[in-house]
């Protein structure tokens, strides 16, 4: 596997866990790499993905514990998520597969004080965004080379199902606008390697979408 831009940010996302073990939801879990990291912190993890192949592969890899992981095939846009239930909801490289309104649903699923983190892909909007995107190109090439060399030394890359690909990403400006609308008080942080991070803590007052 080449250098994985999403996995690179796992430690940052784990730094945003609320205190206590609690219940986590990983949306668009893929083969479950982040779900397993959440379980390793002691959280009880529900990991959902619309792809049956992804869920099967993830479930086959088990859980490192101590937290239990329940994998479930579901389309999170139509699934009846429980309200005020999760202490932590993560959505890694998945939001661009769904309408932005999904954020309002994820918000409602948080307990007061719960945290939603959305690691997303976005196209540059400003000259600063463009500079950051261009600067990532040589660093990415170097990182890929290092990972490739490591894989060769360890007997080649791991096989597994490929996640469905969507090449149409929102712009940074759209991400900022929709995060402000659907998750008031959230922060949007541009990251290296063409990623953005939306962080939201539920304060438990009303729903801006009226939903
Ligand atoms: C690019 S992959 C990211 C997988 C994983 N989060 C990671 O970081 O490796 C996007 C995942 O979102 C899933 N997905 C897309 N639309 C979805 C939906 N409506 N509900 C649940 N999962 C969805 C896809 O099946 C895919 O596994």
Image (tube, helix red, strand yellow):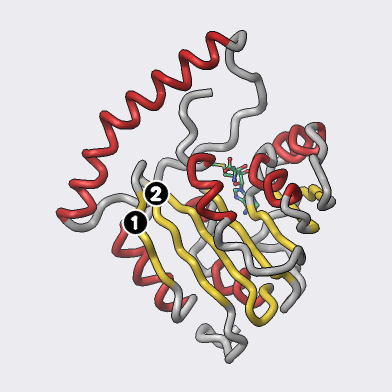
CB within 8 Å, label 2 to label 1: yes
Q: Position of residue 168 (x, y in %)?
A: 40, 46
Answer with left or right where residue 133 lies relative to residue 159: left
Q: Position of residue 96 (x, y in %)?
A: 48, 52
Q: Residue furthest left?
A: 127
Quick check: 185 above or below 100? below
Answer with left or right where residue 46 lies relative to residue 27: right
Q: Position of residue 6 (x, y in %)?
A: 50, 42
Answer with left or right where residue 98 lies relative to residue 175: right
- Separation of marks 2 and 1 at Cα, in angstroms: 6 Å
Give the residue at mark 2: 195
Examine the image and state in which quarter residue 112 appears: bottom right
Q: Residue at x 56, y 58 (%)?
A: 15
Describe the element under mark 2 as helix, strand or loop. Answer: strand
- How many numbered markers are drawn? 2
Q: Residue at x 60, y 58 (%)?
A: 90
Q: Position of residue 71 (x, y in %)?
A: 79, 48
In primary-sequence order, the first of circles 2 and 1 is 1
Examine the image and state in which quarter residue 146 appears: top left
Q: Residue at x 37, y 55 (%)?
A: 170
Quick check: 160 above or below 164? above
Describe the element under mark 1 as helix, strand or loop. Answer: strand
Which image quadrant: the C terminus?
bottom right
Give the residue at mark 1: 190
Q: Nearer the viewer, residue 132 or 206?
A: 132
Examine the image and state in which quarter residue 133 appears: top left
Q: Residue at x 81, y 49 (%)?
A: 69
């Amino acid at each position: 596997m080449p250098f994985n831009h999403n996995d690179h940010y796992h430690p940052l996302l784990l730094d945003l866990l609320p205190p206590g073990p609690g219940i986590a939801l990983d949306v668009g879990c893929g083969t479950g790499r982040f779900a397993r990291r959440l379980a390793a912190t002691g959280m009880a993890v529900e990991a959902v993905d619309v792809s049956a192949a992804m869920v099967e592969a993830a479930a086959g890899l088990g859980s490192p514990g101590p937290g239990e992981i329940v994998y479930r095939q579901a389309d999170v846009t139509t699934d009846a998520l429980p309200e005020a239930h999760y202490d932590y909801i993560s959505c890694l490289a998945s939001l661009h597969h769904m309408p932005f309104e999904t954020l309002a649903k994820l918000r409602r699923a948080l307990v007061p004080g719960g945290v939603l983190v959305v690691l997303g892909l976005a196209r540059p909007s400003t000259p600063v965004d463009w500079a950051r995107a261009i600067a990532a190109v040589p660093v990415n090439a170097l990182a890929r080379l290092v990972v490739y060399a490591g894989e060769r030394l360890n007997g080649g890359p791991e096989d597994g199902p490929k996640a469905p690909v969507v090449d149409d990403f929102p712009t940074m400006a759209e991400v900022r606008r929709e995060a402000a609308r659907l998750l008031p008080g959230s922060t949007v942080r541009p990251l290296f390697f063409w990623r953005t991070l939306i962080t939201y803590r539920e304060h438990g007052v009303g729903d801006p979408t009226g939903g």
